[in-house]
Image: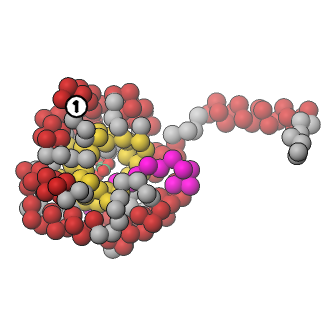
Amino acid sequence: MKLFIDSADPKEIARLAETGLVDGVTTNPTLAAKNGQDYVETLEEICRTIKGAVSAEVLATETAGMISEGRRFARIAKNIAIKVPMTWDGMKACRALRSEGLMVNVTLCFSAVQAMVAAKAGATFISPFIGRLDDAGQDGLTLIREIRAIYDNFDFKTEILAASIRSVPHVRDSAIAGADVATIPPDIFQKMISHPLTDKGLAAFLADAKKAGVRIRDE
Ligand code: E4P
């Protein structure tokens, strides 16, 4: 499974990328607003660190505007994925941008039929928002399973990008349900490998080694 960071904070992204485990980044207008910097400059800074797909979301709502903003983003770096909303204008923009060889991430997906339409429009990624579905009293993971089944039935190549992740179990369950990618907020990424028994076990190993004077000799 690919692990993306869901953030528009270039410094935080660079820090997490030091793990060598960051396969890409997703941004959106809300995250860009939180960062406060110019959006294009932010994306340029992120693309200096991250070589995998970096999603940049259009603000236009009609096809022509989306295409022109998408082309602007695409000039930033080769690894930009243009994020368009799950609307008919978005689908037309998706087709057009894909025909120019650009990556497209279709965002704000809340149903399996929407995901099927996005795949037919040639989307590189589909972003089902599992946390927002859970917040609305529905089951986000069921949506991932449904999309996986449809994509496998018809051999659609669109990658399922689990978005709106709220917890470490969301990452686990998205992987089990067959998502290709999870985009993870920085605080949840940090928590992914925390376990009290790991900390306790490590402390005990080090204490035992110290007590017994265990050393690792240089060659
Ligand atoms: C990522 O592509 C999405 O925009 C993001 O995961 C949405 O997350 P939220 O529902 O926490 O805003």
> Mark 1 near ligand 1 (CB under 8 Å)?
no
Q: How many marks?
A: 1
Three-letter amino acid code at the position of disc 1: Asp
Going 23% across and 56% down the picture, which residue do you hit?
101
Residue in the foreground of this view, choosing between 60 and 204: 60
From the top left corner, tell me how far across and down residue 166 is, in percent. 37, 42
Q: Residue furthest right?
A: 213
The crowding category of the residue bearing disc 1, from other C-alpha atoms within 10 Å (few below 14, some 14 to 19, many at least 20), is few
Picture residue at 41% right of the left edge, 42% below the top? 2
Is residue 52 shown left or right of residue 193?
Answer: left
Residue 19: give x, y in percent of width and height: 56, 50
For the residue pair 156 and 15, the one nearer the viewer reads as: 156
- Residue 109 lies, in percent from the top left, at 20, 43
Q: Which residues are magenta?
A: 17-30
Query: Which residue is at 17% across, 34% downward?
Result: 112
Element at label 1 = loop
Residue 3 visible to the viewer:
yes
The answer to whether residue 60 is above or below residue 26 is below
| Residue at numbered disc 1 | 155
